[in-house]
Amino acid sequence: MRTDADPIGDLRSVADALITATNAFAVEPALGLFTADAVIDDPSTGERFDGQAGVRDYIKRFFVGYRTATRLLSFTRIDEHRARLRVDFTGDFGHEIGLLEIVTDPAGLIVCIDADLE
């Protein structure tokens, strides 16, 4: 990600890129949006996923494995590097509404996602 661009626009771009990559079941492009030590904490799965290996596992299991399609319902900027997304998930599991709080570093890479279901 560019560091000289508008960070608010970049934050939305990161969210859109993550949704696009996971909808395409493109594990490596999705993984490229995360820092090496990123964390995904998802109480709905009962697990926390640490680092690139954990993020890869999360994407493979819950997006590729369940053929999950994600649609953005709302995007709320909390601050320069944090946003809350409300998303619609459909897949082999049925249908759920999810909440994702995404935190990025100054370079625009995802440091943390706190994920849960409504």
Image: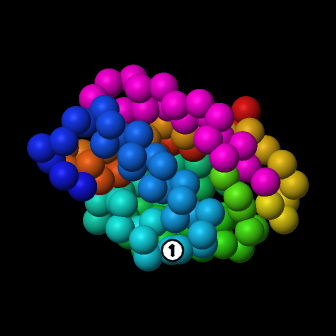
Q: Quadrant of the C terminus?
A: top right
Residue 64 appears at what percent x and percent y? 66, 72
**65 and 11: which one is in front?**
11
Q: Where is residue 50, by image quadrant?
A: bottom left
Q: Does 25 sit left or right of 109 as displayed?
A: right
Residue at the image point whose x is 66% and y is 52% from the top: 70
Residue at the image point whose x is 84% and y is 59% from the top: 93
Which residues make up the magenta segment? 71-90
Q: Amino acid at mark 1?
A: Val
Disc 1 element: helix
Residue 86 seen by the camera: yes
Q: Which residue is mark 1?
A: 27
- Image vertical order of residue 112 relative to residue 6, above or below: below
- Image vertical order of residue 57 relative to residue 104, above or below: below
Residue 40 appears at what percent x and percent y? 48, 53
Residue at the image point whose x is 79% and y is 44% from the top: 96
Q: Where is residue 8, by image quadrant?
A: top left
Q: Does 59 sit left or right of 83 as displayed?
A: right
Residue 28 appears at what percent x and percent y? 44, 76
Magenta highlight on residue 22 = no
Residue 43 seen by the camera: no
Q: Where is residue 100, by image quadrant?
A: top right
Residue at the image point whose x is 72% and y is 43% from the top: 88
Type of secondary structure dominating the magenta stretch: strand
- Describe the colour scheme in one phrase: rainbow
Q: Does 64 sit left or right of 56 as displayed?
A: right
- Image vertical order of residue 83 relative to residue 91, above or below: above
Residue 112 appears at what percent x and percent y? 39, 47
Magenta highlight on residue 84 = yes
Q: Residue furthest left?
A: 4
Q: Check disc 1: other Cα within 10 Å, few if <14, some if 14-19, many if 20+.
A: some
Count of marks placed on residues: 1
